[in-house]
Image: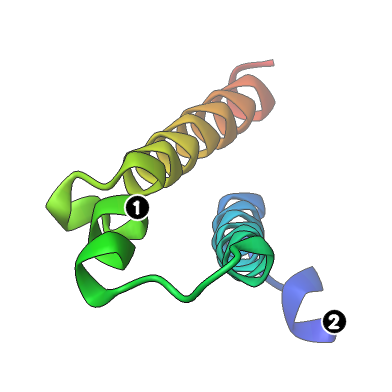
Amino acid sequence: MADLKSMDDAAVALLAVAYLDDALELLLKSRFERSLSADEDKRMFDGAQNGILGTFSAKSVSRMLSVCFWMKCMQTCY
């Protein structure tokens, strides 16, 4: 926790999004009736393979970075 307090807000936000993304993936996988095959896993979660939730994750990180950048600009400008 002390390490997080010394980090920049944007870095903490990125870590939080990455943590939530992993937690969501684990939660979803635990609720499936059967294990996913490697191909199904890629199609669902792999952003490089244009996975359904992989692209959502990439968009979430992009939005979080935009918000953090805007907040940093507001602190600097005003």
In this rendering, position of residue 48 left or right of residue 75 = left
Percent position of residue 23, x then y: 66, 66
Q: Reply above or below: 53 against 40.
A: above
Q: Which mark is residue 1?
A: 2
In this rendering, position of residue 18 left or right of residue 53 = right
Percent position of residue 13, x then y: 63, 52
Q: Earlier in the sequence, mark 2 or mark 1?
A: 2
Q: Reply above or below: 44 against 72.
A: below
Q: CA distance from mark 2 to mark 1?
A: 32 Å
Q: Which mark is residue 44?
A: 1
In this rendering, position of residue 51 left or right of residue 62 = left
Q: Assess disc 2: are there few (<14), some (14-19) or many (≥20) residues with their C-alpha within 10 Å of its C-alpha.
A: few
Are circles 2 and 1 on residues that touch, CB within 8 Å? Answer: no
Residue at image x 66%, y 52%? 9
In this rendering, position of residue 38 left or right of residue 9 = left
Q: Looking at numbered disc 1 in the image, what kind of residue is underneath it?
A: Met
Q: Quadrant of residue 38?
A: bottom left
Percent position of residue 50, x then y: 19, 44
Q: Looking at numbered disc 2 in the image, what kind of residue is underneath it?
A: Met
Residue at image x 52%, y 72%? 34
Q: Nearer the viewer, residue 45 or 73?
A: 45
Q: Nearer the viewer, residue 23 or 2?
A: 23
Residue at image x 63%, y 58%? 24
Q: Nearer the viewer, residue 42 or 6?
A: 42
Residue that sits furthest to the front in the current view: 33
> Judging from the image, what secondary structure is the residue with disc 1 in?
helix
> Judging from the image, what secondary structure is the residue with disc 2 in?
loop
Q: Reply above or below: 22 against 45.
A: below
Across the whole image, how many numbered discs are drawn on residues?
A: 2
Residue that sits furthest to the right in the current view: 1
Q: Reply above or below: 78 against 17.
A: above
In the picture, the quarter occupied by the C terminus is top right
